[in-house]
Amino acid sequence: MIRRLADGLEHDSLELADDLPRSTLTYHTRMLREAGVTWTRGEGRACLIRLRREDLDRLFPGVLSAVVANAVPTEVQE
C-alpha cells in the first residue's frame, strides 16, 4: 500500500490492494491513518488517501524512502 501511495497522489482506498478483502483493507488503512502515516479525506462515497510524506521526511529523514525502495511488488513475492 505504501508503495502505491508513494507517487504523491490521492488514491481511493479500495484501489490500494486489489487482492485483499474490504475488511482487511479498511483495517490497514485505519492503522496507517491512526499512526500518522497517511491523510484521509472523504469525497462522496470514496475515501481518498495520500502519504504524509513531508511530515514523515521531516520527523524521520530517509525512513520512508527506504521503505518504498525496499518494497517488493506482490507479483514478485509469489
Image: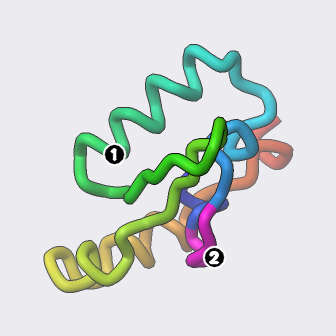
Q: Secondary structure at mark 1?
A: helix
x and y percentages locating residue 9 in the rendered image: 62, 73
Q: Is residue 50 above or below residue 44?
A: below
Q: Could you tell me if the residues under marks 2 and 1 are in contact, i.e. CB atoms within 8 Å? A: no
x and y percentages locating residue 20 in the rendered image: 70, 24
Q: Secondary structure at mark 2?
A: loop
Q: Residue at position x 57%, y 53% from top? A: 48
Label drawn at residue 7? 2
Q: Quadrant of residue 22?
A: top right
Q: Which residues are magenta?
A: 6-10
Q: Which residue is mark 1?
A: 33
Q: Residues within 10 Å of mark 1 (few under 14, many from 20)?
A: some
Of 66 and 12, nearer the camera is 12
Q: Amino acid at mark 2?
A: Asp
Q: Amino acid at mark 1?
A: Arg
x and y percentages locating residue 14 in the rendered image: 70, 37
